[in-house]
Image (spheres, rainbow, N blue to C red):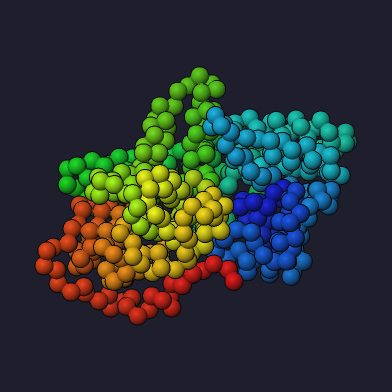
């Protein structure tokens, strides 16, 4: 069975490489020739743990090919996965231009009966439109079936998720197509859910909307904890023990980001609006998240009065650990607010600096060394829970900062451990800590002292 993948973005690349790892012959197509050349050389344009070794192994084995020529990709393919981007329109709807362009090109290039699987996140009814476009331009004697196969890959653990997912959705009106797609994924031994195309499309949006709702919910509870003196970590642990709720996505912080949750929640609100339904709950989820992203800067202003001229270290640029993706990252909103307040910002991240430079240029300093970031800083804002940050000995803040004040937007440190150091520490939904007037010398962290520099150096590619 020959497989083609339209698009080599995050989803397309992971899908193509992992299908090749399963033993299939895979051709990945992209309109950008520079990207194709990079991939042909064995280099991935994204940071994702494990991607480089899988990419090179399958290129060397001859199971994986990259091309900018759609005819090469599609003419002999039995299965074609559409995995192109669906960026957000100004009104919050999903932009489907790339999806429809891919469908049109596929229709022109195929030379055999094919099954078209949509991996891209698309509004309800899109697969029907994809089939219409392909039918309008394909050779009359060929048969085409469409299947909705939404992806559920978490950035930073996408390869693991591909091989160990919770479920695989197969949405189609064709029993024959469903059986063929089922055979592709059967070796993974992941539960298969067969449904109609429209339900499959809705499953993707509903999943992301529900997870985003859990995040905004726990952040609202954290706001109340701040005011009544409760500890959000103990509250989250207590409610998470209820099997009906579960502990996942109950970590209070400065909000969700990335390429999925912000875009998909807004798109679902628009989908609801198009059928004259006001999705009030999801509108509130989005409102809470937008407010949460700026919370750290607001608290800093309350403490200092003015941030004008203050040297501020922003620790973390990626929207989550183990990725270089900064799309809709809370760090971007925070940095913009800090710059607007007149602060002097230095930003640390082990992998996401190149992407952040494209946004901010020379408006701030960047460093891949965390100790450089906090040196001389009057305030440190933690925005991404990288291990490099979580396991940084607290003594380093005392040693290198001008006056150690930390606003922890990801609750990286235990209150008990911080209380042993002369640090002003403000986190989310937990009691603030202020150094005592007569503070004992900082206690050494026996587990990490002396190991930090060699263990958590920058992981930017050479």
* Image quadrant occupied by the C terminus: bottom right
Front-most of residues 100 and 332: 332
* Image quadrant occupied by the N terminus: bottom right
Q: Position of residue 74 (x, y in %)?
A: 80, 48
Q: Residue at x 52, y 62 (%)?
A: 351
Q: Position of residue 19 (x, y in %)?
A: 67, 58
Front-most of residues 365 and 71: 365
Q: Is residue 210 above or below residue 75?
A: above
Outermost residue on the top side: it is 276
Front-most of residues 406 and 112: 406
Q: Residue at x 60, y 58 (%)?
A: 46
Outermost residue on the left side: it is 438
Q: Quadrant of residue 421?
A: bottom left
Q: Is there any visible trace of residue 4 in the rendered image?
A: no
Q: Position of residue 206 (x, y in %)?
A: 49, 37
Q: Quadrant of residue 411?
A: bottom left
* Relative to 183, 390 lies left or right: left
Q: Position of residue 238 (x, y in %)?
A: 25, 50
Q: Residue at x 64, y 59 (%)?
A: 45
Q: Is there any visible trace of residue 182 in the rendered image?
A: yes
Q: Is residue 310 above or below residue 454?
A: above
Outermost residue on the bottom side: it is 450
Q: How many marks?
A: 0
Q: Residue at x 63, y 43 (%)?
A: 85
């Amino acid at each position: 069975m020959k497989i083609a993948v339209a698009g080599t973005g995050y989803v397309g690349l992971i899908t193509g490489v992992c299908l090749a790892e399963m033993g299939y012959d895979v051709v990945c197509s992209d309109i950008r020739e520079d990207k194709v050349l990079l991939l042909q050389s064995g280099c991935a344009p994204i940071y994702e743990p494990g991607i480089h070794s899988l990419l090179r192994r399958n290129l060397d084995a001859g199971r994986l090919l990259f091309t900018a020529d759609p005819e090469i990709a599609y003419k002999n393919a039995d299965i074609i996965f559409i995995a192109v981007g669906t960026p957000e329109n100004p009104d919050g709807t999903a932009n489907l231009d790339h999806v429809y362009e891919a469908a049109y090109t596929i229709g022109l290039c195929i030379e055999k009966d094919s099954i078209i699987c949509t991996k891209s996140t698309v509004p309800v009814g899109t697969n029907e439109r994809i089939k219409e476009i392909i039918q309008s331009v394909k050779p009359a004697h060929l048969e085409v079936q469409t299947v909705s196969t939404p992806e559920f890959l978490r950035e930073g653990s996408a390869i693991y998720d591909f091989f160990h997912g919770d479920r695989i959705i197969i949405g189609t009106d064709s029993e024959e197509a469903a059986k063929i797609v089922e055979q592709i994924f059967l070796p993974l031994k992941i539960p298969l859910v067969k449904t109609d195309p429209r339900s499959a499309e809705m499953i993707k949006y509903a999943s992301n909307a529900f997870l985003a709702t859990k995040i905004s919910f726990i952040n609202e509870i954290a706001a109340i904890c701040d005011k009544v003196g409760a500890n959000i970590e103990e509250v989250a642990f207590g409610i998470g023990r209820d099997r009906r709720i579960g502990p996942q996505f109950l970590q209070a912080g400065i909000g969700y980001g990335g390429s999925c949750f912000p875009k998909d929640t807004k798109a679902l609100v628009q989908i609801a609006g198009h059928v004259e339904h006001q999705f009030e709950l999801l509108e509130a989820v989005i409102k809470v998240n937008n407010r949460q992203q700026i919370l750290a800067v607001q608290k800093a202003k309350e403490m200092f009065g003015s941030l004008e001229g203050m040297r501020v270290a922003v620790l973390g640029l990626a929207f989550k650990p183990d990725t270089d993706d900064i799309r809709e990252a809370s760090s971007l909103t925070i940095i913009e607010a800090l710059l607007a307040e007149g602060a002097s910002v230095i930003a640390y991240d082990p992998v996401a600096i190149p992407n952040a430079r494209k946004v901010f240029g020379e408006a701030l300093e960047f460093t891949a060394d965390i100790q450089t970031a906090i040196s001389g800083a009057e305030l440190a804002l933690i925005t991404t829970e990288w291990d490099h940050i979580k396991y940084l000995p607290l003594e380093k803040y005392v040693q290198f900062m001008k006056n150690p004040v930390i606003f922890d937007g990801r609750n990286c440190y235990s209150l008990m451990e911080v209380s042993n150091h002369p640090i002003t520490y403000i986190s989310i939904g937990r009691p603030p800590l202020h150094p005592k007037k007569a503070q004992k010398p900082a206690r050494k962290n026996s587990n990490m002292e002396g190991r930090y520099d060699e263990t958590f150096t920058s992981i930017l590619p050479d």
